[in-house]
Image (spheres, helix red, strand yellow):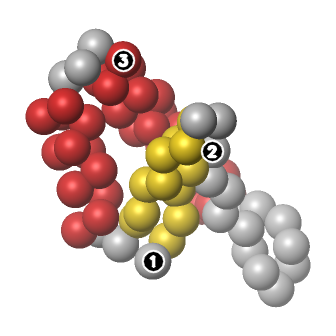
């Protein structure tokens, strides 16, 4: 999964930890939708995150996210 790190300090602050936890939940929901071949839900999650400036990258090892 993706990881948002405070670049100046090289560690997570409270807000970054919350973002990471929420993104883990969202990616898990999207992965479940993909397993069920619920492409409409998986695409909606990806597109909505994209509109918010977050890119989802799918790979054989799983999904990762990063800020644009």
Residue at (35, 72) in percent of width and height: 53
User: As drawn, is 15 to the left or to the right of 42?
Assistant: right
Structural crowding at the residue carrying mark 2, measured as other residues with C-alpha within 10 Å and reported as few (<14), some (14–19) or many (≥20): some
In what quadrant of the picture does the C terminus appear? Answer: bottom left
Q: Nearer the viewer, residue 25 or 17?
A: 25
The residue most toward the bottom is 8
| Disc 1 target residue | 68
Which label was assigned to residue 10?
none
Q: Is residue 36 visible?
A: yes
- CA gap between label 1 and label 2 equals 16 Å
Q: Earlier in the sequence, mark 1 or mark 2?
A: 2
User: Can you tell which of label 3 and label 1 is closer to the viewer?
Assistant: 3
**Along the horizontal axis of the image, is 36 left or right of 31?**
left
User: In the image, 43: left or right of 67?
Assistant: left
Disc 2 secondary structure class:
loop
Q: Which tag, 3 or 1, sits closer to the chain's start? A: 3
């Amino acid at each position: 999964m993706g990881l948002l790190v405070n670049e100046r300090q090289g560690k997570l602050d409270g807000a970054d930890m919350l973002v990471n936890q929420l993104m883990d939940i969202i990616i898990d929901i999207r992965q479940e939708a993909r397993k069920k071949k619920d492409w409409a839900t998986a695409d909606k999650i990806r597109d909505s995150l994209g509109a918010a400036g977050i890119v989802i990258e799918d790979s054989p090892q799983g999904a990762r996210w990063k800020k644009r």
